[in-house]
Every structure is written in C-alpha cells, then in structure tokens.
Amino acid sequence: MPFGEVIVGPPGSGKSTYAFGKQQLFTALKRPIAIINLDPANETIPYECAASIADLITLQAVMETHGLGPNGAMLYCMEYLEANFDWLEEELAKLPKDVYVVFDLPGQVELWTNHATLKGIVKRLTKAGYRLAAVNLCDAHNVTDAGNYVSMLLLSLRTMIQLELPHINVLSKIDLVANYGELDFNLDFYTDVQDLSYLENLLNNHSPRFAALNMAICSLIEDYSLVGFETLAVEDKESMLHLTRVIDRATGAVFVPPPSSTPSDPTFNPSNLPPSERPNTYSLFSSAGGQIKGPASGVRDVQERWIDEREAYDAYEKMEWRKEGETVAREKEKQKQKEQKEQGKNSAPAREGSGRKGSGPNVIRIRERI
Ligand SMILES: Nc1nc2c(ncn2[C@@H]2O[C@H](COP(=O)(O)OP(=O)(O)OP(=O)(O)O)[C@@H](O)[C@H]2O)c(=O)[nH]1
Ligand SMILES: [Mg+2]
C-alpha cells in the first residue's frame, strides 16, 4: 500500500524546494522516498528524482513542434502524460515496494482548478492503490493583503473540490512573512479561517462597490468550514516534521506499520494475556489520530518563532548550530586520531572511510540543512 503526496500550488510557492526538503528529511529519518518530477518546465531540479516527465516529453519540444506558447504547451504536456499513463506506471513499478512517493507538479493553477487531466491522473493513481494526499502550497505573503487572502481561500477550496483527495493547505515560506510588514491579525486568524467578517473593512477599502459580494464570498467559505492552513518554513526541521505528521494522518500512513517492521508472531494471541498487558488498540489509534504535540506544532508557537520573536530565535538557532558544528568537528578529530593510532598498531593500512559508518559527509550535510 504505497503512500504519497501530490504537491500543488501557484508558481513559485515553493513546491520543488519542499520536495527537496522532504527528500532530505526522509533520508535523515531513513524512510524510503521517491520523487517524481511531473513539471516539464523544471529545468534545474534540486532533488534527486526517481523519474521525470522530461524523459517522456519536454515543454520546449512541444512549443517548437506545435507552435504553442508556454501555457498552452504545459497543458499539452499534461494531456500527453495522461494519454501515456503507462509510462508513469512503468516508472512507478521500478520503485522499491512501499516507498513514499512525492509528485512535484507545475505551477499552472488551472491544472488543479478546472482542467480535467490532473484529476484523471490522480484518479488512476488512486485506482492503482496509491494512498495520496494533495498538499497545496500557498505563499504566506498572501495573508498580508485581505483581497489576496480571500482569493487564496477560494482557490484552495476549488482545488480541494477538483482533486477529491485528502487535502492539506499550507502557508509556505512562513519564515518570510514578517518581511512584508505587520499583519492585521494574529496568524491563527489566517490559519483557522474562523470569522472572516473581521475582513469587511479591509476588503471594502479596496473595492467599496463590491462590499456585499465580498462578504457573500466570505460567508460561503465560512459556511463549509473546509479551508484551514498549516504552515511551513522548509529549512526548519520542526516545521517539516509537523507537516509530515499532518500528511501521514491524512493519508492514513500513521496507522500502518512501516514496511521494514518485522511481522508479528502469528502464534501470539493477546487474549491469553491479563487485561493490563493486552495491547490497547483504541489507545494507540486515538493517540495516532489525536492532537499533534511537539515544538512548533501550534500556530501560536509558529507566530512566536517567525513573527514576534524571529530575531531572538534566529540568534539562538545560530548559536546551537555553531555548537553542533563544533561537536561534529571534535568527534571527527577524535575519530581521525583513533584511526591513526590503529594504523600505527596494525601494519596493514586501514580501508578509506572505515569506522565512519553513519557519519559520512552526506549525513552531516542533511543534518545541517534540516
Ligand atoms: N525563505 C524561504 N524560501 C523558500 C521556501 N520555500 C521555497 N522558497 C524559495 O522560493 C523560490 C521558489 O521555490 P520553488 O521551489 O522553485 O517554487 P515552485 O513552486 O516549485 O515554482 P514553480 O515550479 O515555478 O511553480 C525559491 O527561490 C526557493 O528558494 C521557504 O520555506 N522559505
Ligand atoms: Mg517547481
């Protein structure tokens, strides 16, 4: 039962960067992950991709062959992908069993608001057994303007209705939101989407002629209570971990043992145990599905980290990283000295890299980044 996610969101909202961050996080957690690039315009892919649509079709080739502009060519590429779905199936079949699959998509909004292709592709993946969530990244700077915020809400709602997947809206680049000036409300006002009537004055200042329409749109969004947001700062480990937990819960991955876990003993019968020693399935499920706790998991913590006390936290983190860097350097030096001593004892030269299992340069780089 492979789990995964489809990353959607307007151009530049951080989809490919997030996919790269996810790859680094999962690699550090030793959780198998494969990223499929489905954006034919992605020229510099930051992550290591398991398959890329560029091997099937490129935007440039379509523009030249069919005389289309970049937007038309993009739609053509996606239609071509749907028509050649077997290519995607073959690429997915090459992946290890039960690997977590991430699909990085282009930023063309109509693909997931009204164009049928992506919906068709997602449906076929779901039918093939993939348990996917749609992760909709929206640039957090939209919360600094009431009009942009409302249009982001509408777009998110529309995406959810179109894709029919477990849906997670995310305010991406939350680390930058303080750069756009002071917010009119606390961050939880924007993430919880509870009472949009507070936006009335701000919206009416922009477009007084459409005051009634503005409020009708707000009440429509509120009535269904379907839109809410998580936050994301891709370089922040806690932020990435929190979002991963939310997505795992939406797809159901949190309720399934990891593929690497050893199967339980078939002869084990818990009903033979005294009641206090029996596994409490209800408790396990309710804690997996319950409130997510941990640093930076609450929106108030996020507000404190990235808006109210950003500079103090940045300075603290810098200090912690420096300390960690010094510890790693010390450990490396110790290891080197140990190896040199051993080399002195043994006449046979030690193999290059021996004794450094699990602390190679790649792992250090990942640890520093997340
Ligand atoms: N500060 C900050 N910058 C980010 C974050 N996520 C992405 N970025 C930056 O945002 C820019 C756009 O990111 P991309 O990942 O290319 O965005 P995209 O959604 O894939 O863009 P398209 O593929 O063109 O639709 C890059 O310069 C990233 O470095 C974040 O969490 N914080
Ligand atoms: Mg991209």
Image (cartoon, rainbow, N blue to C red):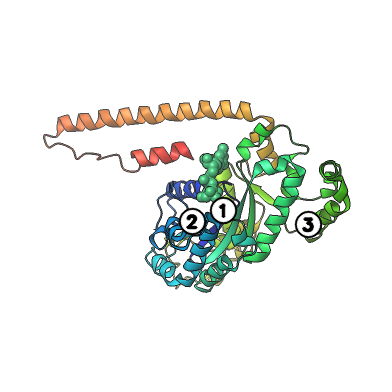
Q: Are marks 2 and 3 in contact (CB under 8 Å)?
A: no
Identity, as a three-letter code, of the amino acid under mark 3: Ile
Identity, as a three-letter code, of the amino acid under mark 1: Gly
Residue 48 lies, in percent from the top left, at 40, 50
Q: Nearer the viewer, residue 84 or 153?
A: 84
Q: For residue 35, which quarter of the picture?
A: bottom left
Q: Nearer the viewer, residue 190 or 342?
A: 190
Residue 336 lies, in percent from the top left, at 27, 30
Which quadrant does ligand 1 occupy? Answer: top right
Which residue, given by chain and number where applicable, does mark 1 sit on? Answer: 107
Q: Nearer the viewer, mark 1 or mark 3?
A: 1
Which residue, given by chain and number where applicable, does mark 3 sit on? Answer: 221
Q: Residue furthest front?
A: 67
Instruction: Decide if ligand 1 comes within 8 Å of the CB at mark 1.
Output: yes
In three-dimensional space, the C-alpha distance between marks 1 and 3, rounded to whole angstroms, equals: 24 Å
> Closer to the N terminus: mark 2 or mark 3?
2
Q: Nearer the viewer, mark 2 or mark 3?
A: 2
Callout count: 3
Residue at (21% x, 29% y) in the render: 341
Residue 343 lies, in percent from the top left, at 17, 32
Residue at (47% x, 58% y) in the render: 63
Characterize the local packing of mark 1: few (<14), some (14-19) or many (20 or more) Cα atoms within 10 angstroms.
many
